[in-house]
Image (tube, grey):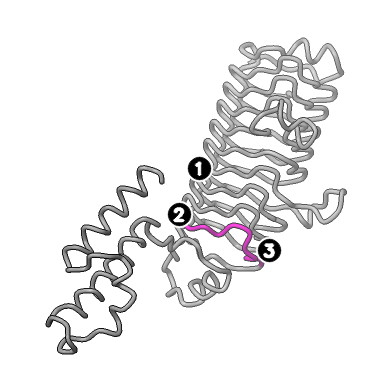
Amino acid sequence: MPFVLRAFFGVIMQELRRHGVRKPNDILSAHAETPGAGHGPRTGTAKAAAGAAIMLALAGLAGPLEAAELTARDVVSTLFKAAPGSKPNFAGNTLDRLDLAGLDFKEADLAKANLFGADLSGSNLSKANLAGANLDRATVTRTNFDAANMTGATILRPNIYATLEASRTEVPSFVGAKMSGAHLGGRFDLTSFHGAELTGARFGPKDHRNEVLITGRAELVSCDFSDAVLRDANLSRTWAQYAKFNRADLKGANLAYANLKGADFTGAELAGADFTGSVLDGANFTDAKGLDRVRGLQEGLHRGEGTAPVSR
């Protein structure tokens, strides 16, 4: 028997002996014994108490019940009962694989919630607190994350499109979302991150070596990052053809070996960004700033036909 279990049952036996129970089998008759029936005045209640002590001890061994393990019905009920202006609290809860489609989360607190594989299609999570939440493999078709706090959240390999063809009518929205340090991987084609805060965010799988045959990159084709803050973000090896980075802050961002064909960087802040090995055919750098401090840009432009940048 493992040491922890031996110690645990030792504590139980001490409790039993304290109540006058010498053998564990004596507990089986505890409920049938009552004071005054040939037993001492405390025997029946003592044994019952000992049995209760064991129940409590077992509960302690198992740890506290996780209020987090809610059902979809529990979530719907909580949202329905929420007073106007209040923010339902699901922080730290386990909501994985639940059908939560079409719900208005009323700016709920979902910090560090586990939403792995949950169906959030058509749900309104705008202004919700999803800091540190796990949204890996979640279905986020038409999900509204606008202005949500998603700092440090993970969204790896989400389900977005009903078919292999990307559609603007199906994509989620992250307009103005706070996503510093977030980790996104999988296919997000056509999705809007307009004005989002993505400082230090990472786009791509957990490990390129282990996921090459599944999703070895983040796909951001025609995504809108206009006015977004992407300082020190990692977009290396992404597919971001025709993406819009107009006026985006990309200082110190890593775009090495990314496919940026036709991407628009008009007016973007690029000081310290790394374009080493990137595909820049047809990319537009008109009025972009900090170009004299960009790595790998000229080489990339020479490989393709990107718009000649104006140094600023």
Quadrant of res 88: bottom left
Helix, strand or loop status at disc 2: loop
Helix, strand or loop status at disc 1: loop
Quadrant of res 26: bottom left
CB-based contact (under 8 Å), mark 1 and mark 2: no
Name which residue lies at 44% across and 56% down: 91
Helix, strand or loop status at disc 3: loop
Residue 93 in the magenta stretch? The answer is yes
Residue 287 in the magenta stretch? The answer is no
Question: Percent position (x, y) of residue 197?
Answer: 55, 39
Question: Residue 82 or 280: which is nearer the viewer?
Answer: 82
Cα distance in 3D space between marks 1 and 2: 15 Å
The kind of residue on which mark 1 rests is Thr
Which numbered disc, 2 or 3, marks the residue that appears first in the sequence?
2
* Pointer 1 local density, CA inside 10 Å: few below 14, some 14–19, many at least 20: many
The kind of residue on which mark 3 rests is Gly
Residue for badge 2? 92
Side of 144 relative to 297 (left or right): left
Cα distance in 3D space between marks 1 and 3: 22 Å
The kind of residue on which mark 2 rests is Gly
Name which residue lies at 66% across and 58% down: 143
CB-based contact (under 8 Å), mark 1 and mark 3: no
Residue for badge 1? 151
Please determine whether, in this image, residue 61 is positioned above or below residue 278: below
Question: Residue 119 or 232: which is nearer the viewer?
Answer: 119
In the picture, the quarter occupied by the C terminus is top right
- Looking at the rendering, the stretch of residues picked out in magenta corresponds to 92-101
Name which residue lies at 61% across and 17% down: 290
CB-based contact (under 8 Å), mark 2 and mark 3: no
Side of 69 relative to 272 (left or right): left
Q: Residue furthest bottom?
A: 37
Residue for badge 3? 122
